[in-house]
């Protein structure tokens, strides 16, 4: 029978206890040594009397911060100790891992910290980002269970690009070429053609884009949804806004105080429905309300996105808004065009503040029209028959869907300066390690 009870720091009780953790701080006083030990759950002070416990004091004074130790001893009440009013009086210390001096600290630049991500993430506020992401994912999955979705896991390699064929990473696949997926788009549509009706895919995707903005990464997590029996993009938008509302409400109920404490952010559960602006309305707003005219039929730039976010916040008091019915020229070939004006499409983007976090649309499910739209993008439809167009030749319901950039959503919810902070390991044009 163990003499000491192995305990996470947050659960320590008065009496004999054994804790495992990192050394955060060592203070050498005249007659005492005070050591702060931390694990994932909290911190505790270890108090050593130099005269009575000289050997233990010598061990601690010879260790650097971030060394990992096991401490066995007696937990006692101590009203003078700020860390929960308890302290650990050690009887034994075991050095599990002796640390070198850390090459980074809290003032290090983000790219230097990313070189030593495994050290950087020991900071409890950094770790809290991923605790938040865990709860976000729990909220998403609770909602899709309520909505009777099926989750599938798609391949990360394919024989061709899933969008236009550009911006893909080529990899060697035995004696042929393969590509890392830009999106699981084809696979979730295949699931609809298979009769799944509602499908969810959570997967890493890769984009070979040399972009160095705060919102871009070459690899990121995409949350993909596809639903059958839609009549327009409105059905898809209506589903997504309910998903976002549920997920943020779920997060606020479970982590509101921690998010306030760690990030200084007051989570706001958005009201439904989100504002909806057509692209034709957007062109008019930019010209008449924002004094920033852009030609009809052109895409939005960073400045126009910023101005629109300010306009929506002022007009509707909302951080989330949809822009829909984009010009067909700027949307992928699988996007359904408007019946009365095929220069526009049944597509949308969802913005959170001034950053797009979602692209969605009703898809084109009619194989003959789909082949024609593929040809319009300069791609030979015959190259995509077996891998895509054939999905729709044997009966397929009208359908639509969207993808949420998981890290972008986290970055904006926590008001963090860059997507680099919210990815466990960041991948960008100039970063392939660790």
Image (cartoon, rainbow, N blue to C red):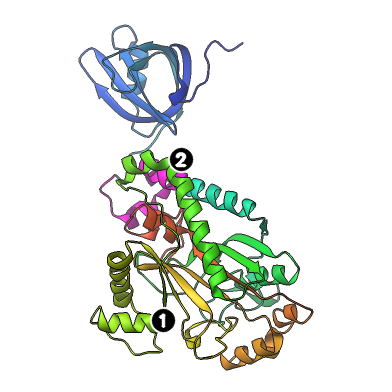
Q: Which residue is mark 1?
A: 279
- How many marks overall? 2
Which residue is found at the position 73% from the left and 76% from the top?
Answer: 396
Which residue is found at the position 38% from the left and 11% from the top?
Answer: 76
Q: Which residues are magenta?
A: 106-132
**Residue 236, percent from left and from top:** 56, 69
Q: Quadrant of residue 282?
A: bottom left
The reply to whether residue 68 is visible in this rendering is no
Q: Mark 1 packing: few (<14 Cα in 10 Å), some, or many (20+)? A: many
Which residue is found at the position 35% from the left and 51% from the top?
Answer: 113
Q: Which residue is mark 2?
A: 254
Q: Nearer the viewer, residue 254 or 40?
A: 254
Magenta run includes residue 115: yes
Image position of 255 with respect to 354: above or below:
above
Image position of 279 with respect to 59: above or below:
below
272 left or right of 233?
Answer: left
């Amino acid at each position: 029978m163990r003499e000491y009870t192995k305990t996470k720091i947050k659960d320590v009780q008065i009496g004999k206890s054994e804790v495992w953790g990192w050394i955060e701080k060592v203070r050498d006083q005249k007659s005492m040594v005070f050591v702060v030990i931390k694990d994932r759950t909290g911190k505790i002070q270890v108090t050593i009397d130099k005269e009575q416990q000289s050997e233990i004091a010598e061990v601690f004074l010879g260790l650097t911060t971030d060394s990992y130790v096991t401490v066995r001893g007696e937990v006692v009440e101590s009203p003078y100790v700020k860390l929960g009013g308890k302290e650990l009086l050690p009887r034994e210390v075991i050095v599990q891992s002796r640390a070198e001096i850390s090459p980074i600290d809290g003032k290090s630049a983000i790219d230097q910290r990313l070189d030593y991500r495994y050290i950087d993430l020991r900071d409890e506020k950094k770790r809290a980002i991923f605790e938040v992401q865990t709860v976000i994912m729990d909220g998403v999955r609770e909602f899709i269970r309520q909505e009777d979705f099926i989750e599938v896991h798609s391949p990360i390699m394919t024989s061709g690009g899933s969008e236009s064929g550009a911006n893909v990473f080529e990899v060697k696949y035995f004696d042929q070429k393969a590509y890392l997926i830009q999106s699981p788009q084809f696979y979730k549509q295949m699931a609809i053609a298979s009769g799944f009706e509602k499908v969810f895919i959570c997967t890493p995707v890769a984009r070979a884009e040399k972009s160095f903005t705060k919102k871009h990464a070459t690899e990121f997590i995409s949350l993909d949804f596809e639903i059958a029996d839609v009549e327009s993009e409105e059905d898809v938008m209506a589903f997504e806004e309910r998903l976002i509302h549920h997920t943020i409400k779920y997060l606020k109920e479970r982590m509101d105080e921690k998010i306030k404490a760690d990030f200084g952010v007051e989570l706001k559960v958005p009201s439904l429905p989100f504002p909806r602006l057509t692209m034709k309305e957007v062109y008019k707003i930019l010209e008449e309300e924002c004094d920033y005219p852009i030609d009809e039929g052109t895409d939005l730039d960073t400045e126009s996105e910023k101005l629109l976010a300010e306009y929506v916040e002022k007009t509707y008091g909302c951080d989330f808004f949809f822009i829909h019915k984009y010009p067909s020229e700027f949307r992928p070939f699988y996007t359904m065009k408007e019946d009365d004006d095929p220069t526009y499409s049944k597509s949308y983007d969802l913005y959170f503040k001034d950053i797009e976090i979602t692209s969605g649309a009703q898809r084109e499910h009619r194989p003959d029209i789909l082949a024609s739209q593929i040809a319009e993008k300069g791609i030979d439809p015959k190259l995509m028959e077996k891998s895509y167009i054939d999905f729709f030749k044997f009966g397929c319901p009208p359908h639509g869907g969207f993808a949420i950039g998981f890290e972008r959503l986290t970055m904006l919810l926590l008001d963090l300066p860059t997507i680099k902070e919210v990815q466990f390991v960041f991948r960008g044009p100039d970063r392939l390690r660790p």
